[in-house]
Image (spheres, rainbow, N blue to C red):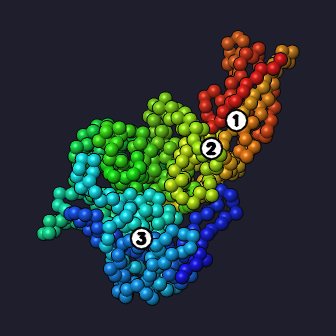
Amino acid sequence: MLTAALLLSLQVSSPLAVVADTIRAEQDIIDYDITVFIPDRGESIRASARIRYVLRGGFGPLILDFDEALDVDSVLLNDSRVGSRGPDWDWEVIEGAEPDFLVLRQWSQVGDTLSVTVHYHGRPEDGLVIGKNVHGRRTAFADNWPNRARHWFPGEDHPSDKATVSFTVAVPDGWSVVANGLLVGVDSLETGRTVWRWRESRPIPVHTMVVGAGELAVADLGEVNGVPQTSWTFPQDSAFAVEQPFRRAVQIVRVLDSVVGPFPYDKLAHVQSSTRYGGMENSSAIFYAEAAYSSRRMSEGLVAHETAHQWFGDAVSQYDWHHLWLSEGFATYFGPLFFEVVGETDRFEEAMRSNKRRYMGSGVVDRPVIDTTVQDPFELLNANNYQKGSWVLHMLRGELGDSSFFAGIREYYRVYRDSTVLTSDLAEMMSRQAGRPMEWFFEQWLLQPGYPQLQVAWSYAESTGSLGVVIRQVQKQEWGEYSLRLPLEVELENGEVVAKLIRVTGKESVHSIDVDGKPIAVKLDPDETLLMSVVDVRRGN
């Protein structure tokens, strides 16, 4: 039996770089070539997966996430067929980890590139959903997030190991197939089936490797810098999709292309599907929930969110699930940012106000964003990683200013495109751009739970024309204290409004502000630029 010692649990000194997941650092999968036969009836598939990988350490074996509910027909190691279960391959369970590892005892030297091909069949229990759509027509759609690809093909079902992928999918005549990457070819067979071949040449996470198949209407949405966008929908919903949620799909890509950097893939398909999520950001082939189309509730905001994921989450992926905010927080911010850039500032501001309300009213306020106590990735789909994550970026923008913030984001994307990151990588990039250490900012907002709750007392000394302001942080002690770049607005008796920017640190912060007139009101953060609340404002003598 394998032991936990064969899996590397990486610990890094910086608290922002903590990795609690088990990572198989000794193996690096570089390419998948997956063939799937979708049946005319039932849910059982015939399939094969050819996996090329490099040994980065040790001598083997290759450990793949794979569901034992599927039956293995044969295994090839470097193109040579091996026997049935036994000395060359077997199923094993590692104590304390997910069950069903396909272990291939192929031994070699560090740096060698090897291949394994697994032929198998059976009914996927999850990951590849075959059934009837909202209109009663038969379809097949992959839905992998976070670690459900193992239910229909073997692989490294973790975001730390990105790879290129090819799909060959055989379907009934009359069906269309969409997948990651570019369409390589379509062949009609005499058996009444059609074979579609797709190839993604950029390394992507396994949870974004997908196929979708059925009777689909394809519409051309336009292109940006040679990158085509298409809509793949059930025929009954095609007109709605083009006229409503995707009417500005090209403009969304154009805006993010200019703000962040070049679109990372060769095409972008927007696909109506059976995903369990509202939208799933599969690389170059976004899947959206079918019911939102049929009920005509599909929103442009969702399209912007999922499109932003192509840069953040797909091209630049979190190395570890506990840093999910690097995906979801970014999409929850850069999706609404589209509206600000095109002049619809009210929509952006309302989105951020909504994010604040949803976070403060959530059940995760007492937990940090980077919460390594969570073992189930589904539990990370919460207001910390989405709404609070978006506010971390918004406040970072306020701390650095637009020029430095967006320059840092563009450099972050350029350096880590097609790779994986931890929060420490972003913090280092932003520190370099700011010309000063910024780790403190990320640590207080991501490693501390909660948010600042401020109590304000102010008084005016007419003899000196001085306004005294005392700000106390009164949030729960376990939430810690925050350093804030706090906007303050003073309304004077003569109608003048004085705007100041002060630095708040520690439990109590005392400030003296010279004003030309008698103050009648003091407001903190009047434009809501910070994730904070004011619990009390008191006027002294």
SS class, disc 3: loop
Q: Which mark is residue 67?
A: 3
Marks 2 and 3 sit apart, C-alpha to C-alpha, by 36 Å
Q: Say which residue appears at 26% left-offset and 68% top-offset.
A: 37
In the rendered structure, which amino acid carries the disc numbered 1? Gln
Residue 467 place in picture, x, y as percent: 79, 22
Left or right: where does residue 441 sit relative to residue 28? right
Q: Nearer the viewer, mark 2 or mark 1?
A: 2
Q: Reading the chain from its start, which is encountered first: label 1 or label 3? A: 3
In the rendered structure, which amino acid carries the disc numbered 2? Val
Residue 126 place in picture, x, y as percent: 38, 62
Q: Say which residue appears at 65% left-offset and 56% top-offset.
A: 16
Residue 58 place in picture, x, y as percent: 56, 82
Marks 2 and 1 sit apart, C-alpha to C-alpha, by 13 Å
Q: Reading the chain from its start, which is encountered first: label 2 or label 1? A: 2
Q: Nearer the viewer, mark 1 or mark 3?
A: 3
SS class, disc 1: strand
Q: Say which residue appears at 73% left-offset and 41% top-offset.
A: 476
In the rendered structure, which amino acid carries the disc numbered 3? Asp
Which residue is identified by label 2?
A: 365
Q: Quadrant of residue 509?
A: top right
Left or right: where does residue 465 sit relative to residue 306? right
Q: Taking 518 as reference, is 100 above or below it? A: below
Within 10 Å of the Cα at label 3, are there few (<14), some (14-19), or many (20+) other Cα atoms?
many
Left or right: where does residue 324 sit relative to residue 195? right
Q: Which mark is residue 453?
A: 1
